[in-house]
Every structure is written in structure tokens, then in C-alpha cells.
Image: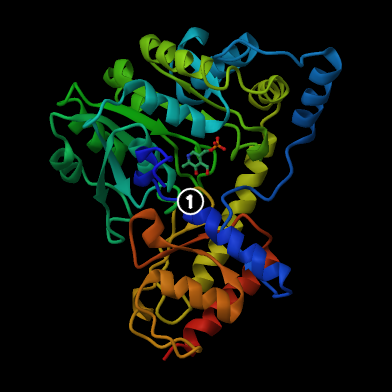
């Protein structure tokens, strides 16, 4: 329709939301559906965090806040970066947004001119290329391989850099693959970046606290301090503290960039919810045992899902280091005939047939820019995960 802005023609709706919607519809029609599409922890927000929000309401902290966030939260963020990442930021170098999503969007909005390129490794979180396109930039997708555990290789990064590259977008642990970069793997990438001073780094550390075993999370500036003046380090409370609905994300970076993002936010949403900001202060400053407890639960689920999926005919499931996703290949099923009689030609066919035959909702890999794979979110109970994996095994065995 001519009335709608041209920019929207460059944007796709979210495939993950579409899958959740389809699963909800099937459920409403009486089907027994297990939804493994949602990207949020199934735990409740910790009680101390909820109490901090209730206290804030009772104290009357219910008014507009400064655009970039209340000083107490910005201080807590600066302290978090020092404590957990050994990064020195002043509170003035931080900004709080309505979810990490707004932080990313505003960073692009503040920096991208038409023709500017953003390097995005695939598989990627569905929103990255769409946000870049909406802000007038050009997403440059660099596809990783399952053999390389879905990790970008330094030569791939170097080849993708042009004079027009503005950002390198880095996400570890990754949504959707769960892959997380070790210190050495990340250093190999930052060694490339130091050679190209015009390229900035936007690191999405949203899943920082969800890594397993003795894996040690690292973020680009920690590994290569010389990138400090051209890195925006983004994070949030959604995944670590089961606070997806509170909508608080944050970042730290060079003052000039933070000020530009503040300017956009000031004409857009203003400060994030005052109550949610006070809750986030408690999440960051309060006891951290919630994080360790949940990490252990997620690790047990990952082990269960990886082991059961690798027993399904035609599925190969790598063992990711973090987040709460696995990203198995269904290449072995392509060309096979599903129980419905339909030939599976793509990963989208695979997930559609799986949902219709067995009532298991997962998201096709092509939505994340790399297939034939599919993403399972294991942020649900072990009982449901076991049942879902049993159904996937049955479905794969039934494909001929
Ligand atoms: N980054 C990644 C990789 C994500 O998976 C998500 C949420 O799914 C976000 C950012 C945004 O999180 P929020 O807006 O809830 O802070």
C-alpha cells in the first residue's frame, strides 16, 4: 500500500513470533502442542527483584526518569562491567533502554547512513538484519558452518570488511546456535579488527551468564582493550534474571555514541519504566545465586536435548557452550517423505511437518540465515523436553 513507508518493504516479520503464534492456534483448536520456539527463560523473576519493584511503587518512584536511566541503575551497570568483565566505564558512559532491542536499534539509528554496512555472522538473531535495514544500513551476512561450530573465522571477517563497514555485530553465546567464543577464538577476530580502525564493534552479550561447564565468557574489549574507543558493549537483565517482560537492556561505550543514543531515545520513548529500572538495580546489585542455579538447570536440559536429538535418524546436533538453544542440522531428512506424504524439501518443510504430525513447534534455520537446521529453545521443563525429543525421534524415524 502506497501509504506505508518504503522502509517497511525491506523488513520481514519475526519468524520466531510466527511459530509461537501457529503453535498457540493449534493449541487453541485442541491439539496437544509442545512449544519450543520461545526465547525466554521459563523461571519466574527472583523474589528480591520483584520486591524491589513493589518497594519502588510504594515509594512513589512512578514518574518519568532521566532518558538514559536513573543514576542508581547506571552506577549499578558501571559496577557490573567492572565486577564481571573488568571493564572501566563511568555511569555517564552507560545507557538504559526498553530492552536490549531498543539499545541495538538506537545504536544503529544513531550511526547508520545509507550504504553503511554492518557485518552479521549467520546464523543470527532474527532482528539484526531487519533493524539494520530499517535504519537505512546494509546487512552483510557472513555464513558460518556447522563444522566450525557456527563460529566466524578470522579470514571470513577480514574478507567481509570494506570501506563502507561501520559495525561488526558480535553475539556470544549466540541466539540461535548457542555457540560461544573462547578467549583465543575471540582474540583471532579482534586481531583482524585492530587492523581496521574504521570498524566499530557492537557486542550483544545478552546470554553472558548462560555458559556451561568450565567455559569462561569473554567480551571483545576485555580481550582487546584497544577496541575500547570503538565498541558498544550491550547486555540486559532479560535472560540472566528471567526478566523478559520488564524490558530493561543496557550498554556502555564511548560518550559521544551514548549521547547520540540518548538524543534518539529522548524523542522516542524517554526513560525506560521507572519501576522496572528499580527492579534492575536489585538484579544487578543483589544476590547472584539465582544466576548460578539456573545455569545448572539449563546445562542439564542441554545435555538431555543434545543426546536425544543425536539419536533421531537424520539429525546431527552440536553441543553448544551456552544460551538455551540448540541448532541441529536436519540435512539428513531433506528429500525424505514425511508421514503426511509430503516431500521435505527445506528446513521450513521439516518444521511444518513436525508441527502438524507430532505437535512440536521449533523454528526453521532459514529464518536465522543458515540451514537446513532448526532451533530448539530448551527453556522449558525436562519432562516436556523429553517428550518433545521422543516425538522428534518418532517423526524422523517415520520419514522415508
Ligand atoms: N539479543 C539477543 C541475541 C536476543 O536473543 C534477545 C532476545 O531474544 C535480545 C537481544 C533482546 O532482549 P531484550 O530486548 O529482552 O533485552
Task: Judge whether 267 appears above or below 240 on screen.
Answer: above
Residue 198 appears left or right of 314: left
Image quarter in which the C terminus is found: bottom left
User: At which x and y percent is residue 26?
Assistant: 65, 70
Q: Badge 1: few (under 14), some or many (20 or more) residues near its Cα, within 10 Å?
A: few
Residue 384 appears left or right of 303: right
Whether residue 302 is visible here, answered yes or no, is: yes
Whether residue 182 is visible here, answered yes or no, is: no
**Disc 1 element:** loop
Identify which residue is drawn at 50% across, 66% down: 306
Q: Is mark 1 within 8 Å of ligand 1?
A: no
Work out which residue is located at the far front of the displayed protein and give it. Answer: 2
Q: Quadrant of residue 58?
A: top right
User: At which x and y percent is residue 54?
Assistant: 83, 25
Q: Quadrant of residue 157?
A: top left
Q: Which residue position holds label 1? A: 14
Q: For this rendering, which residue is in front, 105 or 203? A: 105
Residue 298 appears left or right of 4: right
Task: Judge whether 221 appears above or below 90 on screen.
Answer: below
Amino acid at each position: 500500500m502506497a501509504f506505508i513507508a518504503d522502509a517497511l518493504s525491506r523488513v520481514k516479520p519475526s519468524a520466531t513470533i510466527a511459530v509461537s503464534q501457529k503453535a498457540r492456534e493449534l493449541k487453541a483448536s485442541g491439539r496437544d502442542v509442545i512449544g519450543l520456539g520461545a526465547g525466554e527463560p521459563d523461571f519466574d523473576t527472583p523474589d528480591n527483584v520483584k520486591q524491589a519493584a513493589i518497594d519502588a511503587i510504594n515509594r512513589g518512584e512512578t514518574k518519568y526518569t532521566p532518558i538514559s536511566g536513573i543514576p542508581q541503575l547506571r552506577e549499578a551497570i558501571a559496577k557490573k562491567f567492572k565486577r564481571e568483565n573488568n571493564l572501566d566505564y563511568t555511569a555517564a558512559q552507560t545507557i538504559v533502554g526498553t530492552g536490549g532491542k531498543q539499545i541495538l536499534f538506537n545504536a544503529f539509528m544513531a550511526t547508520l547512513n545509507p550504504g553503511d554496512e554492518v557485518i552479521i555472522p549467520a546464523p543470527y538473531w532474527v532482528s539484526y538484519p531487519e533493524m539494520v535495514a530499517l535504519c537505512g544500513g546494509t546487512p552483510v551476512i557472513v555464513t558460518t558452518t556447522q563444522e566450525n561450530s557456527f563460529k566466524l573465522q578470522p579470514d571470513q571477517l577480514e574478507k567481509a570488511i570494506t570501506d563502507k563497514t561501520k559495525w561488526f555485530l558480535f553475539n556470544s553465546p549466540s541466539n540461535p546456535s548457542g555457540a560461544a567464543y573462547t578467549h583465543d577464538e575471540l582474540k583471532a577476530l579482534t586481531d583482524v579488527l585492530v587492523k581496521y580502525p574504521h570498524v566499530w564493534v557492537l557486542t550483544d552479550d545478552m546470554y553472558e551468564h548462560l555458559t556451561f561447564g568450565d567455559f569462561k565468557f569473554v567480551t571483545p574489549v576485555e580481550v582487546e582493550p584497544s577496541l575500547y574507543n570503538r565498541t558498544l558493549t550491550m547486555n540486559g537483565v532479560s535472560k540472566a534474571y528471567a526478566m523478559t517482560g520488564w524490558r530493561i537492556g543496557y550498554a556502555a561505550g564511548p560518550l559521544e555514541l551514548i549521547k547520540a543514543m540518548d538524543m534518539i531515545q529522548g524523542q522516542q520513548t524517554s526513560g525506560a519504566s521507572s519501576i522496572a529500572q528499580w527492579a534492575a538495580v536489585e538484579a544487578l546489585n543483589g544476590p547472584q545465586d539465582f544466576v548460578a542455579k539456573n545455569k545448572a538447570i539449563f546445562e542439564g536440559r542441554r545435555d538431555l536435548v543434545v543426546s536425544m536429538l543425536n539419536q533421531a535418524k537424520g539429525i546431527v546436533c552440536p553441543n553448544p557452550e551456552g544460551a538455551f538453544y540448540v541448532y541441529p542440522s536436519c540435512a539428513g531428512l531433506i528429500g525424505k517423505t514425511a508421514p503426511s506424504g509430503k516431500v521435505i524439501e527445506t528446513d521450513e518443510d521439516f518444521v511444518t511437518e513436525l508441527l502438524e504430525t507430532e505437535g512440536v513447534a521449533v523454528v526453521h534455520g532459514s529464518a536465522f540465515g543458515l540451514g537446513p537446521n532448526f532451533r530448539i529453545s530448551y527453556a522449558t521443563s525436562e519432562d516436556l523436553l523429553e517428550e518433545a525429543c521422543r516425538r522428534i525421534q518418532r517423526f524422523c524415524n517415520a520419514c522415508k
